[in-house]
Image: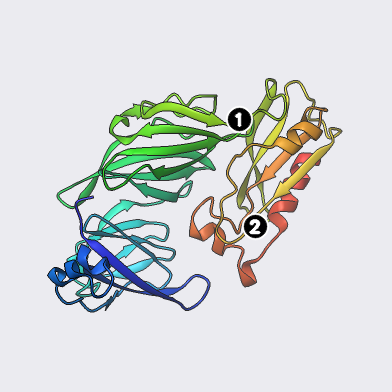
Amino acid sequence: RGGGVYEFQYRSKTFYTSTYSVRKIENGHLLKLGDPDRIDAGPEPEFVTLDVPEDAGVAMYKDLALLSLRTDWTVDGTTYTAGSLLSVRYDQLITGSVGCSYDVVFEPDENTSLEGYSCTKNYLILNTISSVKSRLIFLRVRDDKFEMEGADAAPTIRSVSCSPLDAESSDAFWLTTSSFGQPPALYLADAERCGAGVGDSGPLPESPYVTDRVKSLPDQYDASDLEVSQRFATSKDGTKVPYFLLCKKGVKLDGNTPTLLYGYGGFEISLTPGYKAAAGKTWIERGGAYVEANIRGGGEFGPAWHQAALKVHRNLKCLFSSNWYIFS
């Protein structure tokens, strides 16, 4: 992708903390010892331990290091918010964290977090979620800074993931998407065509970057009259907890409708909208309601949403609040 070859070593200290060491090597260093072509690469450089937070994630794009923060980080008098994605030149970072020029690639707000990112040859694709709705943002590097080239026009109720087709030579990528009423589908897309598009949870995303529909799992239940709404329950401590309500159109929500309530909150894993084959066939088609609650402990609103349910902060009342709100 126009950068060097970087070799990482990391040591996991706890479930969420690690130390990272990295070195920049030549292609010849990847060859086995004794290979004649390896001689031209010269001696291998030493690993350098990076001066970054131990709970941060580290990756490389071209010659820029990408730092994913799980807690606030203050360096050179500037505090970078937990959940942010920073970029910094590799040749600066290996000299220490102080004195580096950091670029804020993504900064969360109270409703939006970074679910992940993917890299093609020329683009960084951010998978963001805003109030548990997906939105892709396309960035490109100019003068060591990331600039937005395009994005979905609005967040959409769906799950989405991206992976490059060949990040060394192409901006094509695989796009996998699903929603409560749409089974997982695989598309071929091109980041060069990002532009400003509209995400959609229908059979084909109405986005300029989608080029071909490759395949899809078959429908497992009749979702033609499925009604999906997002609501918020208020926990006893005042926290707004989002949940999705699924039912057939026309179902009366008067407290007498049989309802299944599911919630998950753990390991900073986001419970994003996905196809509900079993619940759809055995429950929703028969007139029942299905509720999926995004309780604290997950990653829907960034690291703080996860940390709010740890240890002394663990509190299942947010799920019970959803229960009370729906059935009362």
Report which residue position mark 1 lands on.
182
**Image x and y of residue 84, in percent:** 37, 56
Q: Is residue 328 visible?
A: no
Indicate which label's residue lies in the foreground, 1 or 2.
1
Identified by mark 2, the residue type is Asp
Look at the image and name its color scheme: rainbow
Report which residue position mark 2 lands on.
237
Q: Residue at x 38, y 45 (%)?
A: 126
Instruction: Give the alpha-carbon distance from disc 1 to disc 2, as whole Å.
Output: 35 Å
Quarter the C terminus occupies: top right
Q: Are marks 1 and 2 in contact (CB under 8 Å)?
A: no
173, above or below 106, in the image? above
Q: Residues within 10 Å of mark 1 (few under 14, many from 20)?
A: many
| Residue 218: mark | none
Secondary structure of the residue carrying numbered label 2: loop
On screen, residue 319 versus residue 106, left or right, reads right
Q: Is residue 120 visible?
A: yes
Q: Earlier in the sequence, mark 1 or mark 2?
A: 1
Identified by mark 1, the residue type is Gln
Q: Residue furthest right?
A: 256
**Image x and y of residue 305, in percent:** 55, 57
Q: Nearer the viewer, residue 170 or 36?
A: 36
Q: Nearer the viewer, residue 125 or 306?
A: 125
